[in-house]
Image (cartoon, rainbow, N blue to C red):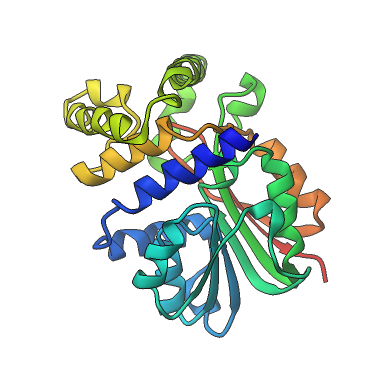
Amino acid sequence: MKNSLLRTQQTFGYQWRRYPDDLFEEEEKDFLNDTQIPPELWAGKTVLDAGCGMGRYARVAVRWGARVVGVDLSSSVERARTLVPEACFLQTSLEQLPFPPETFDIVYSLGVLHHTQDPKVSFMSIARRVKRGGILSVWVYGTAGTYKNFITNPLKDDRLALRKIAPLWWLVVKTREIFSDTLRKVTVKFPPRGLWVLCVALAGVGKLPFIKYLTFSVHPSWRVRTQQNFDWLSPPHQSHHAKEEILRWFVEADFQEISMAKHGMIPKVVVKGRKVK
């Protein structure tokens, strides 16, 4: 456990020190899609960014009028303090948050829980910090899971044609997961600098037609593709979840008005809920 904790701190600190900070418009759009909370609802709210990285989403929330506290396990909080001086940032784990229950109006955790040692424990920890009547929004890596669950995933309109080839599509996602898990058994042992060099090469492949889907990012920017490949291959913990599992967590933590965002070909579980008053 101690070694994996140290590895998590090292790799995320390494990557967030290198992430570009000039993508605000893109990050604003992603933030809206992944929190499912419109800009007008942030003003004056006390907010927890659970797993803030270098503060790219905290910056959006602050510009929308929120009072933000960001936490992260890694030293990336040092860069976040420079990028978003209006917010407060603490270096700590999600399991050991230094806040009493029901502190925040809004808590969000985007792309973080699946990198913790026990995602459900981390989820329940941040859920306890939401005020009664407050909002919790999370997104985690999806999974192929069972075919029965997979075919009911909420898809974006332009992906509905995938329903016609659902068995093949499910098999492709399943195979991709197995390949990824196998590859990560090796890459999580690489020193961060060496793995970064490999990810730079993968970023080049990410521009090639069709072959690019064998990598873990097809983002238009070379710098972001490098970072996203590193994000996928470096952390010691990476879990994948079915929507049914995450929805159960929300119910167990006393959340209602639960909604899910639609996604594309690769499952992505994005859930928002309001805590029962």
Image coordinates for residue 37, horizontal then vertical, percent? 54, 66
Residue lying at 30% horizontally and 35% vertically, measured from the top left: 193
Is 55 situated left or right of 113 in this image?
left
Is 25 situated left or right of 201 in this image?
right
Q: Which of the two residues, 228 or 157, is positioned nearer the viewer here? A: 228
Q: Which of the two residues, 71 or 218, is positioned nearer the viewer here? A: 71
In the figure, residue 105 lies in which quadrant?
bottom right
Q: What number of labels is visible?
A: 0
Residue lying at 56% horizontally and 85% vertically, measured from the top left: 44
Q: Is residue 269 visible?
A: no
Q: Which of the two residues, 128 or 37, is positioned nearer the viewer here? A: 128
Image coordinates for residue 135, horizontal then vertical, percent? 66, 66
Query: Image height check: is 123 above or below 55?
Result: above
Residue lying at 45% horizontally and 56% vertically, measured from the top left: 75
Image coordinates for residue 64, horizontal then vertical, percent? 44, 78
Image quadrant for the C terminus?
bottom right
Q: Is residue 128 visible?
A: yes
Q: Which of the two residues, 21 or 60, is positioned nearer the viewer here? A: 21
Image quadrant for the N terminus?
top right
Q: Residue furthest bottom?
A: 44
Image coordinates for residue 48, horizontal then vertical, percent? 59, 67
Residue lying at 40% horizontally and 59% vertically, measured from the top left: 54
Query: Image height check: is 165 above or below 235?
Result: above
